[in-house]
Structures are given as structure tokens and as C-alpha cells.
């Protein structure tokens, strides 16, 4: 399942994965989104940013978000 999340009028890809031992429908998005949510001082840019970040299970790069579900799942599990 692939979808988008909007933050500050920009759309970012989001995927939902089920990972054994971690749960189902876990939201995975991109570092581009994370970089918009958190500033250079590691602070949230605003309250909405914090709410979004707290919902995202894991961030990956733009190429990785397009990987097949099994491959993306393995990548996430290897980096937890």
C-alpha cells in the first residue's frame, strides 16, 4: 500500500508495512519528510510536525521507499 502525507503543502510518500514482531500497518516515510519535521537543532518545526513524526515508525531514503514490500520490510528490520 502506497500513499502520501502532506506537510506544509508538500506531499511525501508513505507506505504501511506489517513487520513480524513489531506490528501491522506501520507507517514508513522518507528522510525528506523527517527533515521538514525536525530542524537543524533537532527540534520540531511546529506542533503538527511533532504529531506527524510520532506516527511514523521508520524513515528511509527516496529510492528505498519504492522497493518491493518484502525488500523494504527486510531493510527496516535490519536497521531497527
Image (tube, rainbow, N blue to C red):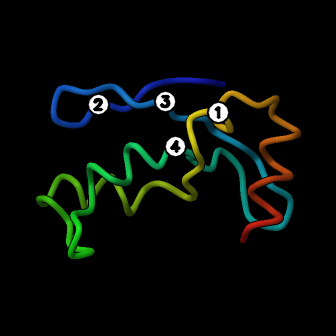
For marks 2 and 3, give the CA distance. Answer: 9 Å
Q: Position of residue 59 (x, y in %)?
A: 55, 53
First-in-chain label (2 vs 3):
2
In this rendering, the answer to whether 42 lies above or below 63 is below
Q: Secondary structure at mark 2?
A: strand
In the picture, the disc for residue 13 is 3
Ranked by sequence position, the earlier of labels 1 and 3 is: 3
Q: Which mark is residue 63?
A: 1
Would you identify the image quadrant in which residue 50 lies?
bottom left
Residue 9 horizontal side relative to residue 11, left or right: left
Mark 2 or 1, nearer chain start: 2
- What residue sits 33% from the left and 53% below the top? 35
* Quarter of the rendering containing residue 32: top left
Q: CA distance from mark 2 to mark 1?
A: 19 Å
User: Which tag, 2 or 4, sits closer to the chain's start?
Assistant: 2
Q: Position of residue 45 (x, y in %)?
A: 14, 59
Labelled disc at residue 6: 2
Checking the image for residue 29, the label placed there is 4
Q: Confirm or deny contact between disc 3 and disc 4 (CB under 8 A).
A: yes
Amino acid at each position: 500500500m502506497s500513499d502520501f502525507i502532506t506537510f506544509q503543502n508538500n506531499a511525501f510518500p508513505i507506505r504501511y508495512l506489517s513487520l513480524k514482531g513489531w506490528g501491522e500497518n506501520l507507517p514508513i516515510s522518507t528522510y525528506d519528510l523527517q527533515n521538514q519535521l525536525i530542524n537543524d537543532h533537532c527540534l520540531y518545526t511546529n506542533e503538527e510536525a511533532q504529531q506527524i513524526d510520532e506516527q511514523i515508525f521508520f524513515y528511509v531514503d527516496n529510492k528505498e521507499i519504492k522497493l518491493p514490500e518484502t525488500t523494504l520490510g527486510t531493510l527496516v528490520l535490519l536497521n531497527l
